[in-house]
Amino acid sequence: MEQGKPMIQRTPLSPRDAAAVAASSERAVEGLGLRVRRIGPGESLGDVQRLRREVYFHEQGGQYSDRSKRVADGLDGCGTTVVVEAGAQAIATLRLHDFGSPAVQVEYGHLFQIDPFARAWSLPQVAVGTRFAVQADQRSKPVVDRLMDEAYRWAQEARIQFCLLACEPFLHGVFEHYGFREYLPPAILPGGVDLLRMVLVLEDEPHLSECGSPLHRLVREPLRAPPAKAWLTRTFNVAD
């Protein structure tokens, strides 16, 4: 356990769930020729670097000069990167951290207004998803479904209560479909780029069902969600 990082009480897994967790680091997606896996802290990112560069700079014309769109940074060494692969090629990716890390607090705390979370919750229960990229010719629902499924499983295993992310407006509908909602006004970056700040309450079965999220079928502990959802509504005036 990292120094200063609060311990989280974890619910013991059933033998069935334990077997699923053991297999979760590398999942074959039947019928599509795809593989989903996690790249752990300190492991090589491999082709993920190429995918990020292709999406952030080649495809988007290098319009991003802010540090949020760098191909790699120091946080790659301590986060978990989920990747969907076709053969040896990365076609979709998302990086995950919890806010128990001081480095993550420094990098993303202001953007996501983490202080209210810190006053009410253990910061390792709050995660952030960054470095989302999907190859242009692979932007299909099955591919993104697999990516988000694995990210959700990671969050469940880590006992995450809230998952945060910031996205451009054209991606709002994508993440809304998976159960994310805006909880703050858009952030305006240098250069006038708007970022929507969104949150997913883990295990919020009614909301995931209402929005038709594919993550609904993964809910295991629906009783975890109501206190978190009520707090979020009070604190950020998020519509129920």
Image (cartoon, rainbow, N blue to C red):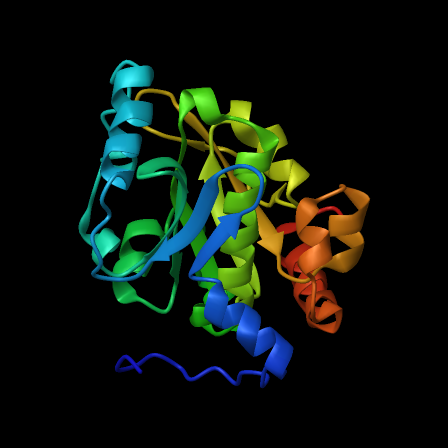
Q: 108 or 202: nearer the eye?
A: 202
Residue 135 location (% of width, % of height): 40, 27
Question: The N terminus appears in which quarter of the rendering?
Answer: bottom left
Residue at 66% from the left image edge and 51% from the top image edge: 215
Is any atom of residue 186 visible in this view? Answer: yes
Q: Give the image quarter of residue 96.
A: bottom left
Above/below status of 70 relative to 6: above
Q: Give the image quarter of residue 43.
A: bottom left
Residue at 53% from the left image edge and 36% from the top image edge: 143
Q: How many marks?
A: 0
In screen coordinates, is 58 left or right of 144? left
Q: 25 or 97: nearer the eye?
A: 25
Q: Give the image quarter of residue 40.
A: bottom left
Residue 120 location (% of width, % of height): 54, 71
In screen coordinates, is 170 left or right of 190? right
Residue 90 location (% of width, % of height): 34, 37
Above/below status of 55 relative to 97: above
Q: 224 or 19: nearer the eye?
A: 19
Residue at 25% from the left image edge and 28% from the top image edge: 53
Is any atom of residue 240 visible in this view? Answer: no
Residue 107 location (% of width, % of height): 28, 51
